[in-house]
Amino acid sequence: MNVRLMAGVAVAVVTSIMLAPYIARRLRIVRPAAYLAALTVMMIVAVTILERAEGLPGFDVGTALTWWTTLRQSPLEVARTEAAWWLNLALFVPAGVVWAAVTRRPFAVAVALSGFSIGIETVQGLTGLGAADLTDVVANSLGGVIGVTVVALALGASPHLVPSFIRVEAGADEQRFDPKWILGSFVATVLAIGAGFGGVEGALAARQRTLREEVEATYEGMTVGDINAILEQDTIGLNPFLVLEAGSPDSYRFYGDDRPVEVRYPIDLLGRYRCVFVTLSDAPPVFANASGKECTEDRYPE
């Protein structure tokens, strides 16, 4: 379990509960809607900033001021090869939907979310809590645009389609402290997060199956002599042969001579790790799935 992510989620939930009354008063909306609006923003902070916190953050003004001047890769190429890009996109869709619904100002929300993304990347560049990347801004902004577009189309189809029940009628007393909605909001959040983690685990399992199939097909019939010949050409273990479509190896244990060689292929999603091992010897290759620490501990050629 990613403890930092869970701590970040807890901070997001508590902060959203505290902000909900203020947002409800400012926008004249019911508290559950205000809580949901706050939570969509705080969950972004939890995933992009709080989840990365490990010890004291750094302070790099140079990176904070210049990260936006370099495009690491074409956004289309990143979208094609990196699942994290799609997660960055999906992360901003709920905020676009909820804030456009409660404010009924889709364009302003889209601009605000793009600015919010730029602010997050700048903080990451300044503190080292994550890697500031212009392609992330593209993904975040596109996610926000998708969210607000859904609401804009709904408003265009029917101005009353966006629920009027989120609004508070003039003179209504909706700002009283009511433990019921806090408890209900907390339970709903826990259930939603549980469903989200279930989805992450399902996606990881599917990726691990795909990776395992490709690893087995690639290494079928190979022996320790074959892999030794490949690894001797590239001592850091990144020989093009080892890089598969479903994943790349991050380490191997190379014992030399005719002793076994073990190669690890890791995958991760939102701080959850899975991997596939292949061990080659004079016998047929042995394949194994693993998760957690086995997929993250440092491993160096021996």
Image (tube, grey):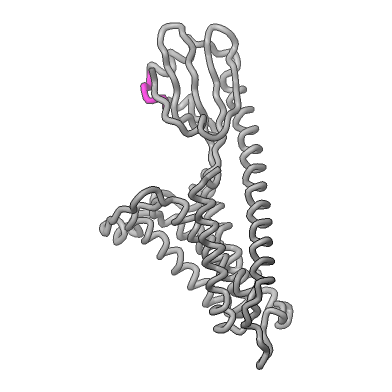
Residue under the image location 72 percent in, 78 percent down? 163
- The residue lying furthest to the bottom in this view is 171
Q: Is residue 192 left or right of residue 265?
A: right
Residue under the image location 55 percent in, 21 percent down? 278
Viewport quadrant of the N terminus: top right
* Residue stretch in magenta: 233-238
Nearer the observer, 167 or 35: 35
Q: In this view, does 262 lie above or below 223?
A: below
Residue under the image location 65 percent in, 37 percent down? 205
Q: Is residue 302 above or below residue 270?
A: above
Residue under the image location 38 percent in, 56 percent down? 124
Q: Is residue 73 above or below residue 118?
A: above
Q: Position of residue 112 (x, y in %)?
A: 48, 72
Q: Position of residue 200 (x, y in %)?
A: 62, 46
Q: Is the magenta stretch mostly helix, strand or loop?
A: loop
Viewport quadrant of the C terminus: top left
Q: How many labels does the image show?
A: 0
Taking the magenta stretch, the answer to whether it contains residue 235 is: yes
